[in-house]
Image (tube, helix red, strand yellow):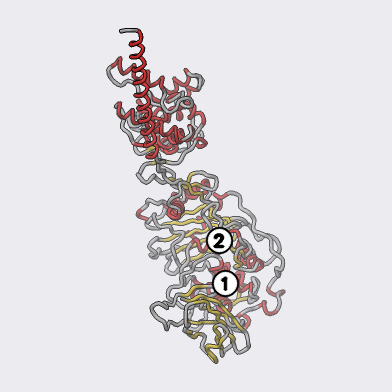
Amino acid sequence: MTKRRRWRAIAAGALLSALTLGTGWIAFDRTVAAATESLREPDTGTLVVDRENAILRAFAAPDGRWRLEAGLDDVDPRFLTMLLAWEDKRFHEHGGVDGRAVLRALWQSARHGRLVSGGSTLSMQVARLLQRLPTGSLVAKWDQVVGAAALERTRSKNDILGLYLRLAPYGGNIEGVRAASLTWFGKEPRRLTAGEAALLVALPQSPERFRPDLHPAAAKHARDRVLTRMAELGILEREEVERASAEDLPARRRAMPMLAAHAAERARQAHPDARRIALTVDAGLQARVETYARARIAAMSPPLSLAILVSDHQTGEVLAALGSPDLLDAGRQGHVDLTRALRSPGSTLKPLIYGLAFERGLAHPESLVDDRPRAFAGYAPQNFDHTFEGVITARRALQLSRNLPAIELLQGVGPARLVQRLRRAGAEPELGNRSLPGLAIGLGGLGLSLRDLVSLYGAIANGGVARPLREEAGAASALGQAAGALVLSPQAAWYVTSVLAGATGTVKGSPGTIAHKTGTSFGYRDAWSIGYDGRHVVGVWIGRPDGAPVPGLVGQDAAVPVMRDVFSRIGPENRLPVPPPGILAGSSGTLPPPLRMVGRAAGSKLTDAGGPEIVFPPNATRIELGFAENRNAALALKLRNGTPPFTWYVDGAPVERGLYARQAAFRPAEPGFLDISVVDAKGAAASTRVFVD
């Protein structure tokens, strides 16, 4: 072959090689592009955290694996250093495939006739984990190479490392360093010992063979190999390696955190797509309350259960919420959130009754009231102990929780006003099928939840101003940020606080540290204690989840000790506030004559002498009359107080005249807003505005 022909052959060969390489590169590029389209972020479970980002409860990913969100900032920096040194020391230099490692792996495979080392980079491992690729074959290795190239093309190195932190297998259904650290060590991966970090580096190499709970010897050997290598590389000192090698391995899997279980589940259901939800709960306090509650309930026979709620009455934030002592206790129906269960509140509404009487000038804490048997239009309540005190101060009557004086004051205040103020406090009372509330609601004849009562007492504690209870951090709505609803005047709220704190008279200065009231529902079904200091409200309920009677269950004996124990776990008590301006201090004899003796104690009937009040329809509500089905639907009109006869007006036009009855009916012509007003015989008026459809 001549020299010219030889050069032509070489050139043709080079051109063919170039074309082959070019075609191969184009094909590879297209393959990588196609793989890029298929890359998807892994699903992770939801983390519910407290006000300081401590984990309250973790939920598994949709596929049932414990795979939790984790970024570089969530992990001990030393663990990251050890991971890269062990798995891929040239991670930040290569483009997804480490050529040196691949050549070394090919050479070793050729020498031994089998796959000795894979030459995998972290990027290739992430591609395998992300796409659930098999291992141990050349085809699988090629798929990893393509996947690694696709990752490097679309993500930064930190993003790829973050994917590894979420996907690395750690045995069983545990994936990712956060879930692994919580499972094996019971803590977040931000602060790991050298031994813990080494175990988390070693485990993903063979997560089942190295599981410390099943194969402790193999796990220790794998961990110690990593420690030895870190010492050789100068990442760890020899002394530290010796201490780390002596660390005990975890002998069992730990349960995932499950604090404030009901509140966390409710938040997850409200935000099903959120991967991280922050609550106002204090994880430390929640843990102390739950530990205490489990110990306390262990001494009580099932199905007796317990619920506790702690709030900051100045902000409305829920700091601890225990719907049941144990979510998984089927014998006590642990899955039921008893902080929201509707129950009879017993005597817990008496402070609001007295507060309204104080606010309206019907009574004063030092006013004399009558605790003797009587009937109220056929309703004849009895005291809990079936005894009577006779004429005593309103302060003493509330402290002793006497029923007769409370009902007499409620008659003057009006049951409808009591319900209205409950709603202002954020409570949602259940009145059953009664169109108008009666006097029986003052002794527990309605349904309220523990959350409702904590809201109410929070308003009293906060000088009469209600702050809506909230559990979600950073979710203070416009309602939460705006000025709270006024439930009681500041003076009336302070009077109530001084009484509930046990003060013996209305004097200046703080009445003490804790004000509280108990309640026991009819038939011994519910035991309550609600207390507050200058910052916190603690609500306690004890009873059976099914509402059955529990003979001998009394709020004073069962619930008060729990309330006091919870306060001791919150920390130092905050003193109750000093009185606001306008407080009338003194004894019964120094009060203005109309306040010295009230109701029957003064020889008169206690009534509300105010003008008419529209109790239905309530103002600013939407009333569904069912126009689509019945064009003749009627709107009920109901009032209390005032002097008959009455005249009703709708949109300025009279619709009923000369009525002596306190209820009427009006048939709207069409859906829309209605301005409704009523005028009594003395010219006093009331109005409301509603939307009907």
Q: Secondary structure at mark 1?
A: helix
- Label 2: how many residues lie within 10 Å, few (<14), some (14-19) or many (20+)? many
* Eye-nearest disc, 1 or 2: 2
Q: Is 626 situated above or below 30?
A: below
Residue assigned mark 2? 468
Q: Is residue 470 visible?
A: yes
Q: Amino acid at mark 1?
A: Ile
Residue 179, image x, y percentages:
42, 38
Q: Is 526 situated above or below 57?
A: below
Residue 393, image x, y percentages:
62, 72
Label 1 vs 2, first from the N-terminus: 1
Residue 458, image x, y percentages:
57, 61
Residue nearer the viewer, 415 or 70: 70
Q: Secondary structure at mark 2?
A: loop
Residue assigned mark 1? 353
Number of the label disc, if any, that sits on residue 4 = none
Residue 314, picture quadrant: bottom right
